[in-house]
Image (spheres, rainbow, N blue to C red):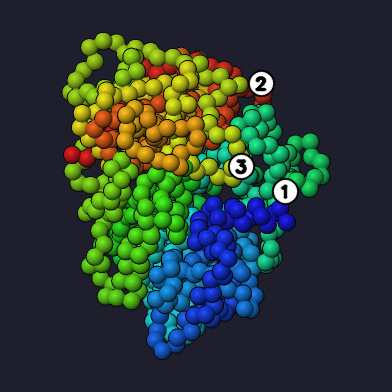
Amino acid sequence: MKRYILLAIFSVFLIVSCDKKTDEKSPKKNTYVADNYTKKEVDIVMRDGVKLHTTIYSPKDTSKEYPILMQRTPYSSRPYGEGKMKSKIGPNVHLMKEGNIVVYQDVRGRWMSEGVYDNMRAYIPNKKENESDEVSDTYDTIDWLVKNVENNNGNVGTWGISYPGHYATVSAIDAHPALKAASPQACIGDFFFDDFHHNGAFLLSYFRAISLFGTYKDTPTDSAWYSFPKMNSKDQYQFFLDKGPLSNLNEYFQYDKLDVNATSSKDKIDDFFWKEIVEHPNYDEVWKSKGIIQHMNKVPSTVATMIVGGEFDAEDLYGPLETYKGIEKHGKDNYNTLVFGPWDHGRWASSGVRNAVGNYYFGDSISLNFQKNIETKFFNHFLKGKGDKNSGLPEAYVFDSGKKEWKSYDSWPPKNVVKENWFLSDNQELIYKDPNTKFKTKPKKIQFISDVKRPVPYSEDIKTVFTPRKYMTDDQRFAARRPDVLVFETDILTEDFTLAGDILAKLKVATTGSAADWIVKVIDVHPSDTKENNDKLQDHLKMSNYHLMVRSEVLRGRFRNSFEKPEPFIPNKKTDVNIKLQDVFHTFKKGHKVQIQVQSTWFPLIDLNPQTYVDNIYKAKEKDFKTQTHTVFTDSSIEFTVLK
């Protein structure tokens, strides 16, 4: 029973079926779908003979034709069985109630579909006869649907959040002629930069989720075939600190190469995804082949795309932005739009009125307005309307998370942006310098001790989570007051300062060791006398002097020059480390301050770097972990994209 409870919780986290949660709490069962739709389950045969389980919801009103809205998912198209219906279908309630044919499909190797599953299954550009990938599976499915589902108007749209968002991206590559609109949302772009990795660093906080994707199955099933590792602790920081090196986590998995002191245990699982992670620590062909953003030149102009992302999405921030930019780069004639809002992972699908991420409140009805006025309008225009480029929607519809208001632009980033370099000073100041200004004095050193026994936590909360979320807007005062976190900030701003685009941290560093991670955080320091009020804050917090984390990122230092070919640091040698932080749209308002934090551990969001170079950190031993002294030089700078 615990397994199914965990599955339900995790599905909510990844798919963000907040509407479903609301229904389950309601004493009244929502019967709209049952009253207005019929359900049919079919197994569609792919070109290589594998059958994919597909559920089709068709309006009972057969007096007109409808478009097909399809979601392909690894998280199950359930409920299975005659007479069992979802309580809500489609991207949102408006598209459900106005009538569309809504299709869900279990992707290859998941749940009731045949075949063997592969995370981010590699795209095959020039397929031979009967060769298949997710692109061909999508094409074959659409082909069957438009030929066999009654009352369809010949137009198909795809959508999905998180992993289903990835499959929506896939649908647009070498697309079927019937596909007219695709909306990849919180879509994974590349597994070396999304979800389980960030710039080569392993997201240790996702450890418990690995078995969801890596437990082998080759027969259809309507029940969970995997189990989750048991932590037996409510303190994930201490749990992972006590576990020590990543190699000690092998005890939760069983396979030949990595089976350490193998004994049979009901808590152990055979996991090909864990093995893949451990055996491929660098950005090699395994990870490159799984990346999808490399193929945005294959999206035809016949498919309109609307990419949706959350500005505070801890899981998939890289994917949506890079997917949008990739289509923009290659598809000059494509209709391609970006929606970038104040959400965590998939929260735009919520039916809730209040919009907040963690402790930080952004306003009311933000998600509801998106569903009604943006998402519904997009699909209706391209599936039921004229389908031309005059959709009435902006190219970029983005939320200023500082001013808490939406803006529309003809491009993203907006055309009127400039790059500005702000330097890190030895007296904890963040100082703007004209690009033509030369340093009059020799850069100074700022040092801190990075203790592997006492790493910097990513959150002050004492808890365990499947996938972290709220830390993306957490108050960073707890970190700013540690000696192993360097703090640099501006004076109180006398006018608004708006960032609109990516951020590049250009660090000049050194270490007494031969390895190190580098983390940079951009923070909005609120005034002590702020008038902002938020009665939903955690009890120990106040909005007075709130340190809002606007953006943050890590780079595993060994990958500073190449993700394919890692290299050690030369001890005590000054070295360039450049870290790209994903786009923001945030105004630091007059009276606030801009703060930068620099640190070398972020635990257990990411795994602990040994700080001595080893070929494979996943196989590092206790003796490899050493406390080191790190140096940041004052000719380090942060390159902001500033809206003028």
Crowding at mark 1 (Cα within 10 Å: few <14, some 14-19, many 20+):
many
Residue 542 pos. (x, y %): 42, 32
Q: Considering depth in this image, is 23 or 126 the residue closer to the camera? A: 23
* Residue, disc 3: 207
Disc 3 element:
helix
**For the view shown, which residue lies furthest in the right direction?**
264
Report the residue at 22% width, 67% height from top.
390
Mark whose residue sits in front, 2 or 3: 3
Structural distance between the alpha carbons of marks 2 and 1: 28 Å
Report the residue at 20% width, 26% height from top.
435
Report the residue at 63% width, 55% height from top.
7
* Residue, disc 2: 623
**Quadrant assignment for the N terminus:** bottom right
Residue 243 pos. (x, y %): 68, 31
- Up/down of 41 relative to 128, above or below: below
Q: Mark 2 belongs to which amino acid?
A: Lys
Structural distance between the alpha carbons of marks 2 and 3: 23 Å
Q: Which mark is residue 427?
A: none
* Residue, disc 1: 269
Disc 2 element:
helix
Residue 290 seen: yes
Q: Earlier in the sequence, mark 2 or mark 3?
A: 3
Mark whose residue sits in front, 1 or 3: 3
**For the view shown, which residue lies furthest in the bottom direction?**
63
Residue 599 pos. (x, y %): 46, 25
Q: Mark 1 belongs to which amino acid?
A: Ile
